[in-house]
Image (cartoon, rainbow, N blue to C red):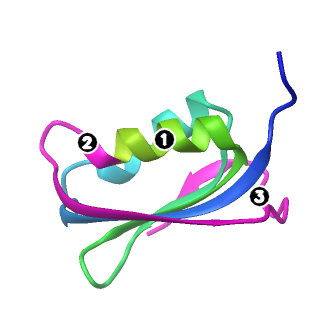
Amino acid sequence: MGKSVEKKARIVVRGSVQGVGFRYYIMQRAQEMRLKGYTQNLPSGEVEAVVEGDVLFIEDLYRAMQRGPTKAKVTDHAIEWGDPKNQFRTFSTKR
């Protein structure tokens, strides 16, 4: 088993993604994968997640966010990679 590679990512999804439990969906999955960071609704109607952790788990979370919870309809998504800053202790939801 190889050494895990730690990364930071900012993921944004667009579509019918607010008011459908998307942030809770993200938080559950991120916590299961032991990722750290936060998710929040943006004024633009998008949902953003900023995460740090194992790159493979971040990629799994990104795939999950492309689907979203049952009532969501994701029409577009993007991910930006960066170096982790170890600034988060847990994964949370912001208002």
Name the amino acid type tagged 1.
Leu
* Secondary element at image label 2: helix
- The 10 Å Cα crowd at callout 1, few under 14, some 14 to 19, many 20 or more, is many
In terms of depth relative to the viewer, which is nearer, 48 or 54?
54
Q: Is residue 39 left or right of residue 1?
A: left
x 37%, y 38%: residue: 64
Q: Is residue 32 left or right of residue 87?
A: left
- Of callouts 1 and 3, the N-terminal one: 1
Q: Disc 2 versus disc 3: distance between alpha carbons?
A: 25 Å
- Of callouts 2 and 1, the N-terminal one: 1
Residue behind mark 3: 88
Residue 87 on the magenta segment: yes
Say above or below: 88 vs 40: above
x 24%, y 39%: residue: 69
Name the amino acid type tagged 3.
Phe
> Can you tell which of label 2 and label 3 is closer to the viewer?
2
Magenta stretch? 66-95
- Of callouts 2 and 3, the N-terminal one: 2
Residue behind mark 2: 67
Disc number at residue 21?
Answer: none
Name the amino acid type tagged 2.
Arg
Say above or below: 3 vs 52: above
Q: Position of residue 74 (x, y in %)?
A: 19, 55
Q: Position of residue 10 (x, y in %)?
A: 55, 66
x 55%, y 40%: residue: 30
Say above or below: 92 vs 28: below
Residue behind mark 1: 61
Q: Can see residue 7?
A: yes
x 63%, y 36%: residue: 56
